[in-house]
Amino acid sequence: MAAGALPPLPNGRAAAAGAPRSRFGRDGPPSDLDVMKERFAKLLLGEDMSGTGKGVSSALALSNAITNLAASVFGEHRKLEPMAPDTKERWKKEVGWLLSVTDHIVEFVPTRQTAENGTTMEIMSTAQRRDLQMNVPALRKLDAMLIGYMDNFVDQSEFWYEKGGDNKRDDDKWWMPTVKVPAEGLSEVTRKWLQYQKECVNQVLKAAMAINAQVLVEMEIPEVYIESLPKKGKTSLGDAIYRSITDEEFDPIEFLEGVDLSTEHKVLDLKNRIEASTIIWKRKMQTKQEAKSSWGSIISFEKREQFEERAETILHLLKLQFPGTPQSQLDISKIQYNRDVGYAILESYSRVLESLAYSVMSRIEDVLGADAAAQNLTATEAARRLMDGDAAARKLDAMEELEKLNEAPASMTLYDFMGWHFDQDELMRKKEEGTLDEAGEAKLKKAPSLAPKKFSYVDSLSAGGMRSPSSRH
């Protein structure tokens, strides 16, 4: 090769002098293999691209990767409409790469093996870890259902969004596009269909919340967090809150009604205080020298256990009522210092699905709110449409919520719903006239209920973003 000549490229062509080279070594967009190599290189390096070993743990790197992928895919999806096909494909493909790590997280399980001579022996073999075996397919199903619910909003024409400079929202969601409806409001069919879609998304939200809460409970509490706590739960709560929780006549609903929760900051502060007191009380109940402590001599074990249960009830109600709040200090610490890769994947995947479901529900509520405004409904009447007396104070169970989703009727587009709606009107008319045959009677009985289950969510909280712990960035 002549002096000063450029080395040939792998395909035999010579590199042009001064030609820019892609970091992937070729011109044009990177291939799927190149993108996958880059993703997993960042995971192996712990996000430390200098390669000096100062990166984060594998668990946190995977958690961040899922969070950041969701933010890049769903962060700009601010309208009630289907995802773009290329964006949907990218999400399915890249989240699949990250979830593939769980296929190689195994545990030993006893299995029976029969030898050639017919004798049976019990040996230990490897199988995918049980929690991953159960929860990863469940989360994938929730993922597919959410994308399917968004696809249902294709070709609808009864509401639309103002364009760019015409957007003049002056509420706390000023950055979101303004939804518009006809002057007379939505049709009855569309209004019921939106309520039906909202209930479907609500079931996905509750299932994702239950899985996320379950995983966070399983994560170890970091020593760094424990060392930052005061010695007494009363110190963490403050006198007023402590008196309310320890009062003989305690009602969690009345407690929350009497606390100032007007801003996101105040909700998060209350959550942090109660979580800290719960950890303090749990540790005091577990310590072997509990009887020797002055605190333990004043308050019995049963009383402490009662206080802890009351605090847990308040935390559960806060999560149901304010699903859009940022993560608490305890959750952030658990995620940041967690070393279990399986937990990291389950927590981050369920968290981004929870955030996406809440975002879709908020978009549906925006449309229903615009409809209420067009019909000049009072604030009370509009709230009655969105709220529900079933403010379930019970603890969400992941398996129970997933079973409800399995039993629920399939989601329908507006056109499917309209066909069902008019079929039911015709069947009801025949029943009233006494001309309904047995087949029609059976069909009428199988019709799904459209009565929306109520729940209360606070419009003042932002639905944007994927709620990644702030201390990670």
Image (cartoon, rainbow, N blue to C red):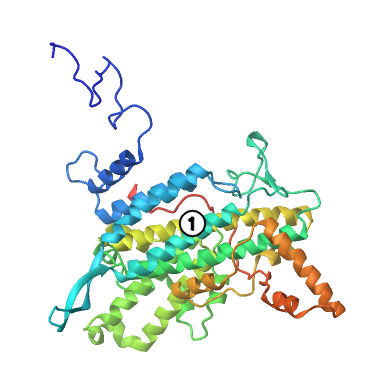
The local secondary structure at tag 1 comes to helix
Residue 195 found in image quarter: bottom right
- The residue positioned farthest toward the right in the image shown: 433
Image position, residue 15 (x, y; %): 25, 18
User: Which residue corresponds to the image point at 51% horizontal and 62% vertical from the top-left?
Assistant: 323
* Mark count: 1
Q: Up-down: is 70 above or below 438?
A: above
In the picture, residue 301 is in which quadrant?
A: bottom left
**Along the viewing direction, whichever of 271 and 149 lies nearer the viewer:** 149
Assess disc 1: are there few (<14), some (14-19) or many (≥20) residues with their C-alpha within 10 Å of its C-alpha. many
Horizontal and vertical percent position of residue 107: 23, 69
Horizontal and vertical percent position of residue 218: 32, 70
- Does 37 sit left or right of 370 as displayed? left
Residue annotated with mark 1? 355
| Quadrant of res 432 | bottom right
- Amino acid at dot 1: Ser
**In this rendering, would 106 be left or right of 255?**
left
Q: Quadrant of the N terminus?
A: top left
Residue found 18% across the figure and 75% down from its top:
124
* Vertical relation: 431 (above or below) 381: below
Mark yes or no: residue 326 visible. Answer: no
Residue 185 seen in this snapshot:
yes
Residue at 39% across / 52% down in the picture? Answer: 95
Residue 231 or residue 154, whichever sits in front? 154
**Residue 107 sits above or below residue 286 on the image:** above
Percent of width and height locating residue 444: 72, 75
